[in-house]
């Protein structure tokens, strides 16, 4: 059966990556994670990939030629689309134009709230608490050159509870929203990629 070849770019613990790995053959049936790129050595994300027999590459984000090396790896592994899962960098317009496939990202708020430059990780949830919102959540969106600016693909709301800290809120948003949305979004994009491959046969 035709499948979409997926690469995941990660900067952190990789819990979203793990949710994606675990969804293969279940929610994610038209796509296969074929490469994980960790943007610094020693990340849990890399270990999670290797533990499941998925090819993993370490391409330090802060080194010269990061984007070029990523593009070369994506071509080498014949990647159809790229998932940013806990990736903390901002990809350039040049990168986005040179990579032929879709790029999606998961952000831990209901965009357009609490997003854009400087909103990442716990800072997003602290901003939601500081504002006093009663509902937050997560968003999967297509990536363009504007940080968190691309077309929204999926969203899921999560309640904010009295006494929440940024940590407790992050944990609930991960569990109730992110780990569900990312596999669903990857399946939507994979099915589209497979349809396009079939049309070319
Ligand atoms: C998550 O909140 C994700 O939304 C954000 O980075 C955090 C860590 O993700 N982009 P992970 O555990 O590394 O997947």
Image (cartoon, rainbow, N blue to C red):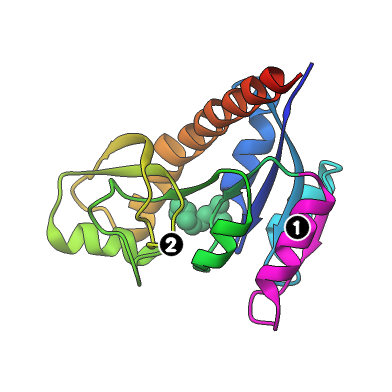
Residue 188, magenta (yes or no): no
- Could you tell me residue 109's position as x and y percent? 32, 50
Question: Considering the numbered disc 2 on the image, is that residue within a helix, a strand or a loop?
Answer: loop
Image side of residue 116 versus residue 194, left or right: left
Task: Find the distance from the CA under tag 2 to the CA under tag 1.
Answer: 26 Å
The picture quadrant where one finds residue 58 is bottom right
Image side of residue 124 versus residue 112, left or right: right
Residue 60 numbered tag: none
Q: 134 or 17, which is in the foreground? A: 17
Residue 63, magenta (yes or no): yes
Q: Residues within 10 Å of mark 2 (few under 14, many from 20)?
A: some
- Could you tell me residue 49's position as x and y percent? 77, 48
- Picture layout, residue 99 above or below residue 2: below
Work out whether residue 76 can be spotted.
Answer: yes
> Which circle's residue, 2 or 1, is located before the other in the chain?
1
The picture quadrant where one finds residue 54 is top right
Residue drawn at (51%, 37%) of the image: 182
- Could you tell me residue 189's position as x and y percent? 55, 31
Question: Considering the numbered disc 1 on the image, is that residue within a helix, a strand or a loop?
Answer: helix
Judged from this view, the residue extending furthest toward the front is 200
The N terminus appears in which quarter of the rendering? top right
Residue drawn at (81%, 55%) of the image: 56
Residue 145 numbered tag: 2
Residue drawn at (71%, 63%) of the image: 70
- Where is mark 1, residue-wise? 46
Image side of residue 52 versus residue 17, left or right: right
- Picture layout, residue 24 above or below residue 141: above
| Magenta segment | 56-78
Total number of numbered discs in the rendering = 2
The C terminus appears in which quarter of the rendering? top right
């Amino acid at each position: 059966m035709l499948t979409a070849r997926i690469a995941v770019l990660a900067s952190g613990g990789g819990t979203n990556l793990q949710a994606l790995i675990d969804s293969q053959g279940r929610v994610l049936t038209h796509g296969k994670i074929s490469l994980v790129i960790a943007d610094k050595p020693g990340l849990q994300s890399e270990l999670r990939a290797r533990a499941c027999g998925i090819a993993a590459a370490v391409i330090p984000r802060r080194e010269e030629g990061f984007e070029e090396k990523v593009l070369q790896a994506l071509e080498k592994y014949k990647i159809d689309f790229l998932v940013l899962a806990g990736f903390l960098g901002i990809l350039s317009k040049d990168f986005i134009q040179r990579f032929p496939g879709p790029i999606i990202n998961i952000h831990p708020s209901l965009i357009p709230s609490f997003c854009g430059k400087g909103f990442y990780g716990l800072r997003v949830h602290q901003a939601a608490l500081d504002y006093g919102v009663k509902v937050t959540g997560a968003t999967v969106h297509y990536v363009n050159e504007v940080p968190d600016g691309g077309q929204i693909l999926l969203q899921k709301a999560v309640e904010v509870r009295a006494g929440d800290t940024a940590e407790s809120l992050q944990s609930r948003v991960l569990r109730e929203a992110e780990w569900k949305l990312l596999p669903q979004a990857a399946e939507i994009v994979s099915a589209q990629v497979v349809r396009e491959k079939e049309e070319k046969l």
